[in-house]
Image: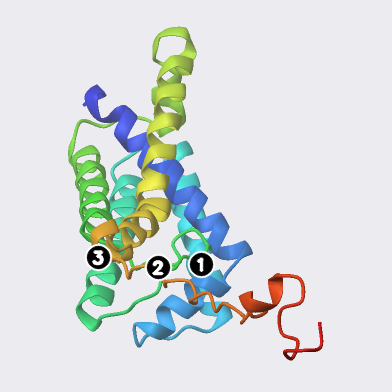
Amino acid sequence: MEVLTGPYTAAVGLLLAAGVAKALRPAATARALTDAGLPGRRFVVVGLGAAETAVSVTAVVVAGPVPPALVAVCYLGFAWFVALGRRRGTTGSCGCFGVETTAPPGVLHLVLNVAAAGVAVAVALGPPAGGAARVLTGQPLAGLPLLAATAVCGWLAYLVLSALPEALAGTRTGAAPSERAPAPLPDPVRLQPGPDPATWLPGAGTEPGRL
């Protein structure tokens, strides 16, 4: 199951980042829970963040099928929450990383959570292995190249979950150039009446006999 080492480590790292962010900045997640009709008290969000952090740290240092199974449960919970929000038509962000965005999570968000859960399930059902840290140390160069690639994958996944929905929402709401309202025309120029041309000649405008 070495082929799953990178994706699984990225999933664990992303879960750790999400847990720490929720615990430190619970406001966005609390608002997302409230919008979905779920309890959104501050202590609930902090508890969720602490649980995610504990699961991810356990997955790093503890061997056996239980830690990856718990990681899978977390991502399945994320997928369920995203599906619930889409079903109820929530317009705000999911608050996964404690950041408020203007766009709701999309289908790609749901797919990524389900994929991460699938990877964790495969690791749990696979041959017994050590925690993520022990698996990395068994790689070439003490796992540094794999760790760097995993960090890049985790960062890209973070962008998909946080920045991409907002960017796509901005693209959909932006009107095409042909659909935009035309610019208003300037106000017409009003000419002021000038002097009578008859008065331009010397002596013009005087009464006869009074030259």
Mark 2 falls on what kind of element? loop
Circle 3 residue: 179
Q: Which mark is residue 183?
A: 2
**Residue 28 position (above or below residue 148):** below
Circle 1 residue: 100
Q: Nearer the viewer, residue 65 or 151?
A: 151
Badge 1 crowding class, 10 Å Cα cut-off, few under 14, some 14 to 19, many 20 or more, is some
**19 to the left or right of 71:** right
Q: Residue at x 45, y 48 (%)?
A: 56
Residue 144 placed where, x, y %? 48, 17
Alpha carbons under labels 3 and 2: distance apart: 12 Å
Alpha carbons under labels 1 and 3: distance apart: 30 Å
Mark 3 falls on what kind of element? helix
**210 to the left or right of 175:** right
Residue 109 placed where, x, y %? 28, 56
Badge 3 crowding class, 10 Å Cα cut-off, few under 14, some 14 to 19, many 20 or more, is few
Mark 1 falls on what kind of element? loop
**145 to the left or right of 5:** right
Query: The disc labelled 1 sits on which kind of residue?
Result: Glu
Which numbered disc flags the more N-terminal residue, 1 or 2?
1
Q: Is residue 62 visible?
A: no
Which numbered disc flags the more N-terminal residue, 1 or 3?
1
Query: The disc labelled 3 sits on which kind of residue?
Result: Glu
